[in-house]
Image (tube, rainbow, N blue to C red):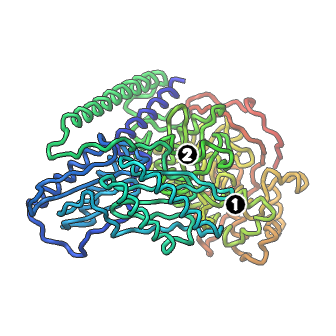
Amino acid sequence: MAKKLILIFIIRFISIISLFTKSIAQSPNYVGDDCHNSTEQSLTATYKSNLNKVLSLLSSDAIVSKGYNHTSIGENTIDAVYGLYDCRGDVTGSFCQFCVSTAASDVLQRCPNRASAVIWYNFCIFRYSNHNFFGNLTTSPSWQRPGSKNITNPQELDKAEDNMQSLISEATLETNKMYAMGEFNLSIEKRYGLVQCSRDLNEKQCNQCLEAMLDKVPKCCGTKIGWQVLAPSCLMKYDDFMFYQLTSATSAPLPNPAGEGGSSKSKTLIITIVIVLVVVLALISCCIFFIWRRNRSNKDGIPSKTIPISHHGHIQGEDTYNADLPIIPLIWIRQSTNNFSELCKLGAGGFGPVYKGNLVDGTEVAIKRLSTTSGQGLEEFTNEVIFIAKLQHRNLVRLLGCCIEDNEKLLVYEYMPNSSLDFHLFDEAKRKLLDWKLRLNIINGIAKGLLYLHEDSRLRVIHRDLKASNVLLDQEMNPKISDFGLARAFEKGQSQEKTRRVVGTYGYMAPEYAMQGLYSGKSDVFSYGVLLLEIICGKKNGGFYLEEHGQSLLIYSWNLWCEGKSLELLDPILKNTCTTNEVIKCIHIGLLCVQEDAVDRPTMSNVVVMLASDTMTLPNPNHPAFSVGRKVTDDQSTSKASKDPSVNEVTISNVFPR
């Protein structure tokens, strides 16, 4: 219990730090720029100095302003510099400051030695010039960004123009606002719009600018559902997902323009308070953590100089958490999922429900929400953060961020549009779409992902729950291993571990794990072998007993192998799409992976080599292990020094002898 409290405290501390720094939901996204001249210019040293001062003043001002400001240095001289930033109306102070500072730094890289430039990001615009542009309407240059979805409703464009006209009217009602957003109904669908003008304009100029941008839409984006049009003086965005925050962050009156001196005292005070708060929290968390670890080391007899592995297999030390993992605000996730609406729900697992959502830039994501009734959810959440955040491979699902806020614990992953492998493989209609070429690609991809986990990653990770439902498929049907809630990491030189109670799915479990609680890389190899045979035949291992006269998939495959009839295992719909030798080789490898004795199974590196070779002579397989079928979710690991696990602590049903 103490360990869980410490872990939650540390993770929450990291989230607090992230909100005070630049590790927030996601980095501002660059949209475009205009350098006003295609060639570099010869700027005086005074102009460059004044430009750097303007950039610095505006960057530091953004965090304490109301989302907009302008300033100038050297007015009425040949070296005068005028600068302005304007953050989107729904962006908070810290996000605005991050966007502005990023833009101020980036504009010098993208527009070197330019007397004037403008740069757009998704959350802000940044401008500077050697001429005073404050209060002047500027609609050129402009950027048009059409969405990727084509319209299906012939009234889409007309409705969009009407909707944006209503927002233009709302935005120009009061000069100090210059911003409006809204939700609109289109038949049974929703549309969302946002308009904003630079707040150095008046109402008439704002209306002219937005009308000019709206006039560009039919030509640039008339056939698309979503689009964005931007100019130096205004912007508008329209899409089919909620890309803005519901609470306007910058609708308050404009701040006074910052002079050369600025309000340095208030800024210094704020920065000092933040630094002190961060340091105090860091010291408190470190003290608690090291006291806990010292007590635990004394209790278990582990020397403090070693890197201990906890009872649940988590490596303690500098690699415990990836501080670079973005922290996504809860308000964005609630908006993205319509407050966790059932309409956005993709499914549910032991961890809790999974929802589909969109990040602010439109990126589709899958969001796991820790269920308050999940007994092992906290452990799974911790595992996902520890492991997936550090693992990067094309055949592993990517963790984009997390959220620990208001008693909510959420994980945000890349969205896999083709769902999981079992969704296709075990459905009579969808299985027909999985031809042999696709299945072979999935077989190879899963093998490469496991090889990375076992041998090539920063952590040596044992997945412990590999099965068809934990393999996701991307847009091109490439496999990605997911769900690391039960995963365990091994220290260098460690080959196996014991647990008092097994967790995972019987039927995919190696016999030494199911019966004795021993798990290792060879346990994953066994699971891979079962999955490989399932992919070949298109049938579930768990339901095979009922169809094949009491034989498990493994025994049935073995008997066909011994009788020289291995091709009878092949899914009938594949018979005209595959190569006989490839199928027999894959069945051979699958049987090698499910050997009863772990020593007889190949490593995943061996498996990858065997799959890639057409000339290698493979060893003869022996009788495979038994197969069992039942889901177990309770887990309590123990070190090797602990007593042997009790098999009687779990009930194993449907045991089939060899």
Image position, residue 338 (x, y; %): 60, 45
Amino acid type, residue under disc 1 in the picture: Leu
Q: Residues within 10 Å of mark 2 (few under 14, many from 20)?
A: many
What residue is shown at x 44% (from left), y 44% (from top)? 248
Residue indicated by mark 2: 335
Image position, residue 500 (x, y; %): 65, 32
Amino acid type, residue under disc 2 in the picture: Gln
Q: Nearer the viewer, residue 469 or 455?
A: 469
Q: Quadrant of the N terminus?
A: top right
Residue indicated by mark 1: 532
Residue 607 showing in the rendered view = no
Distance between mark 2 and mark 1 Cα atoms: 40 Å
Q: Are marks 2 and 1 in contact (CB under 8 Å)?
A: no
Image position, residue 531 (x, y; %): 70, 57
Tell me which numbered mark, 2 or 1, is placed earlier along the sequence. Answer: 2
What residue is shown at x 50% (from left), y 36% (from top)? 404
